[in-house]
Image: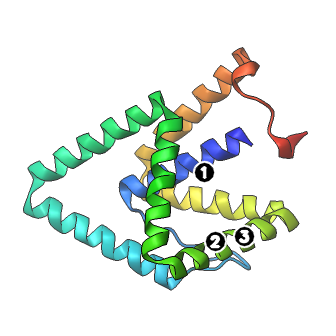
Amino acid sequence: MKSRLLSLVLALTCCAVYAVPVGAQGLPGATVHAEGKAERDAMKSRMQERCKENPQQCEEMKAKMKAHREQCKADPQKCREEMKAQREERCKANPQRCEEMKAKMKARHERCQADPQKCDDERKARFDERCKQNPQRCEEMKARMKAREEQCKADPAKCPPRSDRT
């Protein structure tokens, strides 16, 4: 469970940092949500425009994001609480969108419970697509995952067994 959560956080962080739109082209049964892709593309283009207009501000923001990630590594509980508070604030501002997202997450969870192999295949395909788009970042991610795996072998108490791998 913990390693799946770590994988999810890592994947979301990669998407948030690089705003890389990833689709599920070529996967049988996979869906590509045009609305979400359009939003990501718009965010990515706005970010690129801002960085072209003011590279110094862009570098400052990247440094600020890196510092925030480091703080979250140091105190993950605090970050979770902050994210929860932000999510609740967004839900108050737009409850309909919040309910839609909860329904989508619940449906995905149920699909993955019914067919975990399909979800794993889709996740691996998204990972491979990101690796094609940014091989250097992919190698860094693989190195961190390998280091974490070795850390877990050295001290299994730090990495409790996942509930789905009993």
Label 3: element kind:
helix
Label 2: element kind:
helix
Say which amino acid is labelled 2: Lys
Residue 41 seen in the figure: yes
Expressed as whole percent of the image width and height from the top left, the position of residue 157 reads 75, 20
Task: Quickly name the residue at label 3.
Answer: 106
**59 or 144: which is nearer to us?**
59
Whether label 2 touches label 1, CB < 8 Å: no
- Above-or-below relation of 103 to 70: below
Expressed as whole percent of the image width and height from the top left, the position of residue 34 reads 50, 84
Expressed as whole percent of the image width and height from the top left, the position of residue 140 reads 46, 37
Q: Any mark on residue 102, and which?
A: 2
Q: Which image quarter: residue 44?
A: bottom left
Is 110 displayed left or right of 26 in the figure? right
- Above-or-below relation of 135 to 3: below
Whether label 2 touches label 3, CB < 8 Å: yes
- Above-or-below relation of 5 to 38: above
Q: Please name which of the two marks, 2 or 1, marks the residue nearer to the observer.
A: 2
The CA distance from mark 2 to mark 3 is: 6 Å
Is 4 displayed left or right of 34 in the figure? right
Here the colouring is rainbow
- For image coordinates 42% across by 63% down, the residue present is 20
The CA distance from mark 2 to mark 1 is: 17 Å
Task: Quickly name the residue at label 1.
Answer: 8
